Image: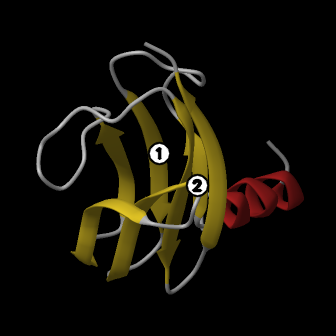
């Protein structure tokens, strides 16, 4: 590769990102991929369509790298949530995103 291409590839690898890593819609479980470039606090919450928090899957400091965040379709109490639309709120000091996901049973 040329020096400019190498620099562009290196710059892209330093960008934090959030992306689906599982099925949407899903039946049993789905996942997100969170990529961080440095140690930082991260949070992953799930809300129903009324805005009520269903579950917090992550709320802690994370190391740099790629992290798979999996949701098994259960609430904080461990009960299976009904079919419907849910929202993933995922954020860190570098990146934040709200994503819509559909649960089908």
Q: Quadrant of residue 94?
A: bottom right
Considering depth in this image, is 35 or 22 the residue closer to the camera? 22
Q: Are marks 1 and 2 in contact (CB under 8 Å)?
A: yes
Q: Is residue 17 left or right of residue 63?
A: right
Quadrant of the snapshot with the C terminus: top left
Whole-percent x, y for residue 93 in the image: 50, 87
Question: Can residue 92 be seen here?
Answer: yes
Q: Secondary structure at mark 2?
A: strand
Cα separation between marks 1 and 2: 6 Å
Q: Which mark is residue 33?
A: 1
Q: Is residue 74 above or below residue 54?
A: above
Q: Give the label on residue 18, or none.
A: 2
Residue under the point 59% across and 25% down: 24
Tell me which label, 1 or 2, sits earlier in the chain.
2
User: Residue 62's x, y, as percent?
Assistant: 27, 72
The image quadrant that residue 54 belongs to is bottom left
Q: Position of residue 104 (x, y in %)?
A: 51, 17
- Point 17% across, 38% down: residue: 79
Neighbour tally class for label 1: few under 14, some 14-19, many 20 plus, Cα within 10 Å: some
Judge left or right: residue 61 versus residue 35. left
Q: Residue at x 37, y 75 (%)?
A: 42
């Amino acid at each position: 590769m040329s020096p400019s291409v190498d620099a562009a590839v290196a710059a892209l690898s330093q960008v934090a990102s959030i992306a689906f890593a599982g099925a949407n819609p899903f039946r049993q479980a789905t996942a997100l991929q969170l990529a961080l470039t440095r140690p930082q606090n991260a949070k992953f919450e799930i809300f129903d369509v009324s805005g009520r928090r269903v579950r917090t899957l992550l709320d802690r400091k994370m190391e740099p790298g790629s992290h798979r965040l999996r949701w098994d379709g259960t609430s904080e109490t461990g009960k299976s949530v009904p079919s419907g639309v849910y929202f993933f709120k995922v954020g860190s000091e570098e990146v934040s995103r709200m994503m819509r996901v559909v649960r089908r049973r």
